[in-house]
């Protein structure tokens, strides 16, 4: 766990090192004790609001950790400078959500029971979300920020990221209409987000007059893509849709470019942002497209202001901020708006307010309708180490 204590505008006071507790040996999630009344009373009466941010610092998704941390710290500095949330100054702590899921759950249990956090925020893979929501359900609010497969309806869990219907569907139709894309090959990491997203994607491909010529799921952490590329070459797709995560996406796209396939085959990715693009390298981004609700190159007053503050706080050499990292900024802005509408940080009124609300962040105004984000979506083409927006939906 890394605790920031209080974060104030223009100055981030951090401890000298990241401290990760070794989780205790526990068995399963079946014996979850409810909060005792004294614990609930203490949470509500404290002057500071303790938020536990579960960000991935290790493993394939760990590449997003630095930008996610910075984005959250920036949001906290802004919110605390304006009086906090409902008059309570935010006290932010970070917990690693990488590694075995059972270890992440153990950290989360300690955060709830011993650190007495008031709110869980998460920027991690959906496999972790499915485990953590069993722990938080009926206990405290849980704001889940990044792109995900959709369909989250667990009481108290508020998911604000892109979903396949708004993110992938318009991009598929655009590629069909403007690039003549008909033959699709799907490759993703072997966990719930790609599984469920591909199920929806196949429907959108059929809608656009195309068909799937191959599909496979790759174990998280696998960086040997020779066999995958051989199958793709044999299938001769027009587009490869990539749902690989973090560094797995980097190694695949590097190998794809080096194999020569990039010159003849389009790529569409749902989790390739500025951080991943930097890892792929300029020589391997030919014919690579990404669909997202946020790119740092978006020309808007809201994003210009966000990027200016990000650079001022962390410097010109700060980690590039893309969709996944920036979602942590959005999560805190969403939480503030929902709490102010509810007039409370208690689980049920806060969750009810968060189901239908408009909040403002780096993307501009984002509407949450019936628990699902309805944001402007962008299709961008990789241009070396940058993105170029080619269509907004």
Image (cartoon, grey):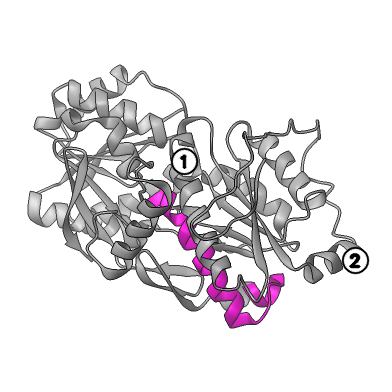
Q: Nearer the viewer, residue 255 or 8?
A: 8
Residue 22 location, quadrant: top right
Residue 232 location, quadrant: top left
Question: Is label 1 in a helix, a strand or a loop?
Answer: helix
Question: Is label 2 in a helix, a strand or a loop?
Answer: helix
Q: Where is residue 158? Give x, y as percent.
A: 56, 64
51 magenta-colored: no
Q: Where is residue 14? Give x, y as percent.
A: 60, 44
Left or right: 165 in relation to 219: left
- Local packing at callout 2 (Cα closer than 10 Å; few below 14, some 14-19, many 20+) is few
Q: Nearer the viewer, residue 388 or 377?
A: 388
Residue at the (65%, 66%) spot, across then down? 89
Q: Where is residue 151? Give x, y as percent.
A: 50, 60
User: Are discs 2 and 1 less than 8 Å apart at CB?
Assistant: no
Left or right: 313 in relation to 388: right
If the image is split into quadrants, where does the C terminus sit? bottom left
Q: Is residue 358 above or below residue 66?
A: below
Q: Where is residue 345? Give x, y as percent.
A: 68, 72
Q: Which residue is mark 2?
A: 37
User: For residue 227, which numbered disc appears in the image?
Assistant: none
Q: Nearer the viewer, residue 165 or 328?
A: 328
Asked if residue 293 shows in the view, the reply is no
Q: CA distance from mark 2 to mark 1?
A: 37 Å
Q: Main secondary structure of the magenta part?
A: helix
Mark 2 or 1, nearer chain start: 2
- Local packing at callout 1 (Cα closer than 10 Å; few below 14, some 14-19, many 20+) is some
Residue at the (34%, 44%) spot, across then down? 320
Q: Which residue is mark 1?
A: 66
Q: Which residues are magenta?
A: 323-350
Residue 327 location, quadrant: bottom left
Q: Is residue 281 above or below residue 170?
A: above
Q: Is residue 272 above or below residue 223?
A: below
């Amino acid at each position: 766990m890394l605790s920031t204590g209080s974060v104030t505008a223009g100055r981030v006071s951090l401890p000298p090192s990241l401290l990760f507790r070794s989780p205790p040996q526990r068995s399963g999630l079946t014996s979850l004790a409810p909060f005792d009344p004294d614990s609930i009373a203490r949470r509500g009466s404290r002057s500071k609001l303790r938020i536990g941010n579960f960000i991935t610092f290790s493993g394939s998704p760990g590449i997003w950790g630095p930008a996610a941390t910075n984005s959250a710290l920036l949001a906290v500095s802004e919110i605390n400078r304006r009086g906090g949330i409902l008059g309570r100054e935010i006290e932010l702590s970070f917990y690693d959500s990488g590694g075995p899921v059972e270890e992440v759950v153990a950290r989360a249990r300690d955060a709830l029971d011993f650190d007495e956090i008031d709110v869980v925020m998460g920027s991690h893979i959906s496999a972790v979300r499915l485990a953590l929501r069993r722990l938080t359900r009926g206990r405290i609010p849980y704001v889940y920020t990044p792109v995900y497969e959709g369909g989250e309806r667990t009481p108290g869990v508020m998911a604000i990221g892109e979903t396949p219907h708004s993110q992938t569907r318009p991009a598929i139709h655009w590629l069909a209409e403007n690039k003549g894309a008909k033959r699709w090959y799907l490759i993703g990491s072997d966990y719930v987000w790609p599984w469920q997203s591909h199920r929806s994607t196949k429907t959108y491909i059929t809608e656009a007059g195309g068909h799937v010529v191959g599909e496979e799921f790759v174990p998280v952490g696998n960086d040997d893509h020779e066999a995958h590329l051989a199958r793709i070459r044999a299938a001769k797709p027009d587009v490869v849709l990539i749902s690989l995560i973090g560094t797995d996406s980097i190694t695949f796209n590097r190998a794809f470019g080096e194999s020569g396939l990039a010159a003849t085959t389009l790529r569409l990715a749902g989790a390739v942002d500025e951080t991943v693009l930097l890892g792929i390298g300029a020589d391997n981004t030919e014919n690579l497209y990404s669909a997202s609700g946020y790119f740092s190159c978006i020309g808007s007053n809201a994003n210009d202001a966000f990027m200016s503050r990000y650079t001022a706080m962390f410097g010109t050499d700060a980690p590039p901020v893309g969709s996944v990292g920036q979602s942590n900024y959005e999560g805190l802005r969403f939480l503030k708006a929902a709490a102010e509408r509810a007039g409370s940080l208690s689980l049920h009124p806060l969750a009810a307010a968060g189901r239908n609300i408009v909040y403002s962040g780096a993307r501009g105004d984002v509407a949450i309708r019936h628990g699902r984000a309805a944001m402007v979506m962008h299709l961008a083409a990789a241009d070396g180490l940058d993105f170029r927006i080619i269509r907004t939906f």
